[in-house]
Amino acid sequence: MYFTFLDMLSSVSLFMEKGGPVLWVIAWLLLIKWSLVFERIWYLNSTHKANVKATLAAWNARSDTKSWSAHQIRTMMISQISLDVKNTLPIIEVLVTICPLLGLIGTVTGMIEVFFVMAVSGGGDAKSMAGGVSKATIPTMAGMVGAISGIFASNYLKAKVDRDLELLEDHLPLSN
């Protein structure tokens, strides 16, 4: 077990070296993105449920649910829950968008290295160019994988949030 972990750590380190410095930026970006995704999932399953219960209890305790001011209070309650639940969704979407762009930066920096090796060696040394090619392709792949997985997570969260907000609106009746 211990050797397996060390082997795994060595493989990851070698992979990160082959991808160049842009791959480290992508890795940190993905760590931040997935931390925010898991935070939103945790929030939706714990704090959000408690906030919705408190909001429903406050609304049901009201004697007036028909007047104009009651409608404004209802709108304010829904808006507050909506702001809380959608808090980090735009950040997650921006991080998903940045992933492939960083992958393209990795492609450009890797190709610059390939062109430099070609200029120095006269263009015929394939072994020398291999390092630049891996620095060009690995970050691109990592950026695309990060973006695709992030799209699925972002869409799941948006759908869950929209469904929860619709249910909240349905459970806050406008009249007695």
Image (cartoon, helix red, strand yellow):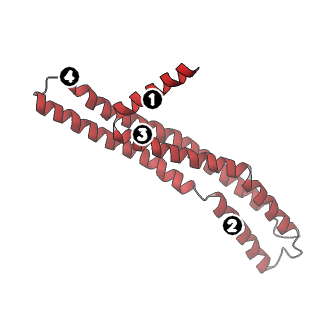
**Mark 2 vs mark 1: in front:** 1
Q: Secondary structure at mark 2?
A: helix
Task: Say which mark, if any, is on residue 126.
Answer: 4
Q: Which residue is mark 1?
A: 12
**Within 10 Å of the Cα at label 4, are there few (<14), some (14-19), or many (20+) other Cα atoms?**
few
**Which of the 4 image quadrants contains residue 118?**
top left
**Mark 4 vs mark 3: in front:** 4
Indicate whether 75 appears above or below 101.
below
Residue found 59% across the figure and 47% down from its top: 37
Residue found 67% across the figure and 49% down from its top: 160
Q: Secondary structure at mark 4?
A: helix
**Mark 3 vs mark 1: in front:** 1
Task: Return the x and y of residue 60 as percentages of the image width and height.
Answer: 87, 67
Contact, CB < 8 Å: mark 3 with mark 1? no
Q: Which residue is mark 3?
A: 143
Q: Which residue is mark 2?
A: 80
How far, Cα to Cα, is label 3 from label 2?
35 Å
Q: Secondary structure at mark 1?
A: helix
Identity, as a three-letter code, of the amino acid under mark 4:
Ala
